[in-house]
Image (cartoon, rainbow, N blue to C red):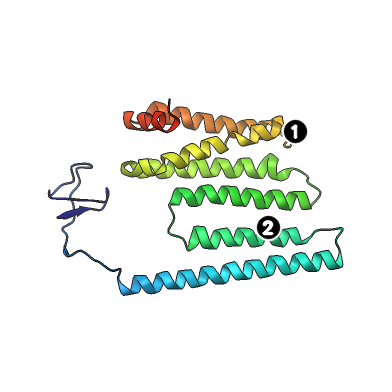
Amino acid sequence: MNYCNYCGVSVDHVTCPLCHRKVAESIDNEVKLYPDYPDMILKKRRTFIAKIVTFLSIVMASTCFVINLLVNPDYLWSLYVVGGALYLFVTMNHTILSSAHTGSKIVLQVISLSSVLVIVDITSVFQRWSVNFAIPLIIIMATLLITIIILKKRMRWREYVGYILAMIGIGFVPIGLYITGIATILWACAGTSLYALLTLIGMLLFSSKTFKEEFIRRFHL
């Protein structure tokens, strides 16, 4: 059987029935019961590195926190280190070393980076720059990135539907922060929510019928 590199399917034809592109001929039709030896070595190395990063993150965060409580408990500077350690843990174990879906990596990066920035902001007398400017910008950039990926990989858009909808939902968080008084800059919060709404409307208007059906199915409309 031949293999289509664009759609990721095996077909008996010279051209793929899905994207109508020429497919590559399969050289090895044998079923691999075990992964290649280099792949196993790489997986073991990634697992070992992930364990090292996890251990170092725990050591760094816990050591600084204990020293902070013993020396100067009135000023919790160790929260900077704890936030950085948590972000390092997420970035290395889930974004770099993990084989998780790209959409999942983007969404988790938004959540983890936003959390770290809020921690840093609160520790530095909470001037609200994190909720007023940083988080809205991060949400807009992440939503735009997933949108670009969907437009470039039209044949694989189903894999990203859940993630773009998740980012659209997260896009309405800043306006909620403004309503509750946590954020104070209306135009930044409202602009982020407006961008999320326009992204949703644009995808419903210009996408295929299949996307609309998938959207309705996921929300049980």
The residue wearing badge 1 is 181
Residue 185 versus residue 63 in the image, above or below: above
Left or right: 65 in relation to 55: right
Q: Nearer the viewer, residue 55 or 1?
A: 55
- Residue at 48 percent of width and 37 percent of height: 165
Which quarter of the rendered picture does the C terminus lie within? top left
- Residue at 51 percent of width and 58 percent of height: 94
Residue 158 versus residue 203 in the image, above or below: below
Which quarter of the rendered picture does the N terminus lie within? bottom left
Which quarter of the figure has residue 29?
bottom left
x and y, in percent, of residue 210 in the image: 32, 31
Q: Nearer the viewer, residue 174 or 66?
A: 66
Q: Could you say which disc has been placed on residue 219 in the image?
A: none
The residue wearing badge 2 is 83
Mark 2 and mark 1: Cα distance apart in space: 24 Å
Mark 1, Cα crowd under 10 Å, few <14 / some 14-19 / many 20+, is few
Residue 132 versus residue 91 in the image, above or below: above
Q: Callout 2, which amino acid?
A: Gly
Q: Earlier in the sequence, mark 2 or mark 1?
A: 2
- Residue at 60 percent of width and 62 percent of height: 88
Q: Callout 1, which amino acid?
A: Gly
- Residue at 50 percent of width and 58 percent of height: 95
Residue 25 versus residue 221 in the image, above or below: below
Q: Nearer the viewer, residue 99 or 199?
A: 99
Q: Secondary structure at mark 1?
A: loop
Q: Secondary structure at mark 2?
A: helix
